[in-house]
Image (spheres, rainbow, N blue to C red):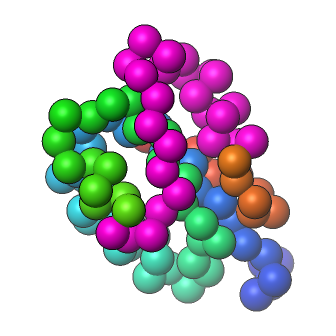
């Protein structure tokens, strides 16, 4: 059973995801067990993804598109995260 002391970190690699994040981020925060933090790894989006993530108080790190690697990018998010458990979303 999960307790109030259990806090997950949500890690989301992003690229031009503002339309999805506009719905997803508020929903994540409204869960009965909200995340400790949401870590976004942005691949140099050309839309307002980074600005939205900052407004929603996410931890956001921007990498170049060339630096994106499915495993490496998620590992970077895990290194930055502080939660008890990591939840990776796409």
Q: Report the label total.
A: 0
Residue 60 location, x and y as percent? 48, 51
Q: Position of residue 28 (x, y in %)?
A: 45, 70
Question: Would residue 73 be seen by someone viewing this image from the given angle?
Answer: yes
**Residue 6 left/right relative to 38:** right
Q: In which quarter of the image is residue 42?
A: top left
Magenta segment, which residues? 55-79
Q: Where is residue 47 in the image (x, y as percent from the top left)?
A: 17, 42
Residue at image x 79%, y 75%?
Answer: 6
Q: Is residue 37 above or below residue 14?
A: below
- Does 15 appear above or below 72? below
40 or 86, which lies in front? 40
Identify the residue shown where x is 70% and y is 53%. 81
User: Farthest top residue?
Assistant: 66
- Residue 39 horizontal side relative to residue 44, left or right: right
Question: How far across and down, in percent of the image, does residue 51 sit?
Answer: 28, 56
* Residue 12 part of the magenta segment: no
- Choose top left, top right, bottom left or bottom right for residue 45: top left
Q: Is residue 67 above or below residue 10?
A: above
Q: In which quadrant of the rendered image does the C terminus lie?
A: top left
Tell me what residue is drawn at x 33 percent, y 31 percent: 44
Residue 89 visible in image: no
Assign the N terminus to one quadrant of the image.
Answer: bottom right
Looking at the image, residue 71 sits to the left or right of residue 58; the answer is right
Q: Does the magenta stretch include residue 62?
A: yes
Q: Is residue 58 above or below residue 4?
A: above
**Observer-nearest residue: 86 or 66?**
66
């Amino acid at each position: 059973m999960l307790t109030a002391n259990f806090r997950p970190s949500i890690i989301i690699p992003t690229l031009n995801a503002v339309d999805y994040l506009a719905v997803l981020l508020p929903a994540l925060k409204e869960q009965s067990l909200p995340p400790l933090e949401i870590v976004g790894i942005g691949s140099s989006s050309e839309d307002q993804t980074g600005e939205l993530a900052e407004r929603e108080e996410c931890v956001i790190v921007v990498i170049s598109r060339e630096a994106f690697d499915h495993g490496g990018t998620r590992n970077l998010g895990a290194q930055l995260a502080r939660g008890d458990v990591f939840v990776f979303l796409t």
